[in-house]
Amino acid sequence: MNLEKMRLKTPEKLDFVSVTSIMDFFESYDL
Amino acid sequence: MILPQPRHNEKYVIVIMFYSAEDIPIAQSNLTAYLIQTFENISGKSKHRHVGLSFGIINYKTIRLFEYDFSCWNGRNSGATSISKYNRDDKDSHMLICASDAIYFELNHHTYNNLVNNLILVHRRGDSNEIPGLPVNNIEYPSLPMILSDYCKSFCNIFMKTLEWKIKDIELCLDQNIKFSQCSQYVLGLIIHCIRHNAIAVSAKQKNEIFSLLFAKTALHPHVLFKILKKTGRCFVLLDKTRKLILSGKK
């Protein structure tokens, strides 16, 4: 993906990042 | 939370993402944002208007990125916001803030694990789970008078850039970052923590240049941070088109 396609949709609002979503990212990744 | 060890031929990577924006929506209703945006347009710094941290996994040809930007933003405390993939049909004005450059560096498992844990931790004074010096949630954004005051003071300190940094000077500046922080300070805090704990190897000259950025305090602009990191070359790598970037969940 090109860098220019990566956007911050609503930077003025905070999102909740759960421990589960982080662990899923690291355990199920496939490069 | 203990992250798994990276797999063979893969490493954990921190991506410092710089963003540009034609017109930041908040600048229409927020005086601080409006003045900063006008200054950036005049001084040619609009390509690097915002900077944030993302983490991911790297191998010899690809970086896979966790889809959140951890940073500070005017009008809210520090924390995470999602990164989205732009498509042509999206007419949402918020989608004007797009990534323009990225610099990445690899980290060892121990430091990386501490950083990821801190990034999802809500800052409370005296919290024993918090690793001091690493970026954390819930840090207040500085006020406009504070930014202007620091901007004026940084002019007075311009000749001090060649001085060697003393530990107490660094501690004093980092202490302010814990109370108030804007996006560049937030990222700089991580870099300085990594250098001080030998997680990033830089020369004495580069170290002094990076530490000197602390003088600017809340007036440190993302564009200035970008220029200094780009100069260091070897450990901070500028993302180019030879390496593929994948956003998690948005292939």
Image (cartoon, coloured by chain):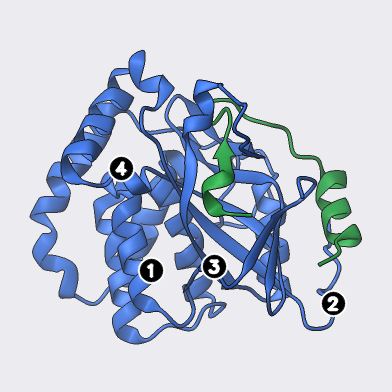
Chain colours: A green, B blue
Q: Are marks 1 and 4 in contact (CB under 8 Å)?
A: no
Q: Position of residue B213 (x, y in %)?
A: 29, 61
Q: Which residue is painted at 57% across and 77% down in the image?
A: B199
Mark 3: secondary structure: loop
Crowd band around label 4 with a 10 angstrom C-alpha radius: few (<14), some (14–19), many (20+): many
Q: Kindly identify which residue carries mark 1.
A: B229
Q: Is disc 3 in the same subunit as disc 1?
A: yes
Q: Disc 4 marks which amino acid?
A: Ser
Q: Is residue B63 above or below residue B179?
A: below
Pointers 3 and 4 in contact (CB under 8 A)? no
Kindly indicate whether the residues beneath marks 1 and 4 are on one polypeptide chain: yes
Disc 2 target residue: B7
Amino acid identity at mark 2:
Arg
- Gap in angstroms between the C-alphas marked 2 and 4: 38 Å
Q: Badge 2: few (under 14), some or many (20 or more) residues near its Cα, within 10 Å?
A: few
Which mark's residue is nearer the viewer, 2 or 3? Answer: 3
Residue lying farthest bottom? B203
Let me know if marks 2 and 4 both belong to one chain: yes
Residue at the (34%, 15%) spot, across then down: B28
Residue assigned mark 4 = B46
Q: Earlier in the sequence, mark 1 or mark 4?
A: 4
Structural distance between the alpha carbons of marks 3 and 1: 19 Å
Q: What separation in Å lies between label 2 and label 1 (alpha carbons)?
A: 28 Å
Q: Residue B27 lies in what quarter of the image?
A: top left
For this view, does A30 lie left or right of residue B194? right
- Provide the chain ID for the residue under circle 1: B
Residue B66 % position (x, y):
71, 52
The residue indicated by pointer 3 is B241
Q: Position of residue B119 (x, y in %)?
A: 65, 48
Residue B153: give its label: none
Residue B2 in the image: state x and y as whole percent: 84, 62
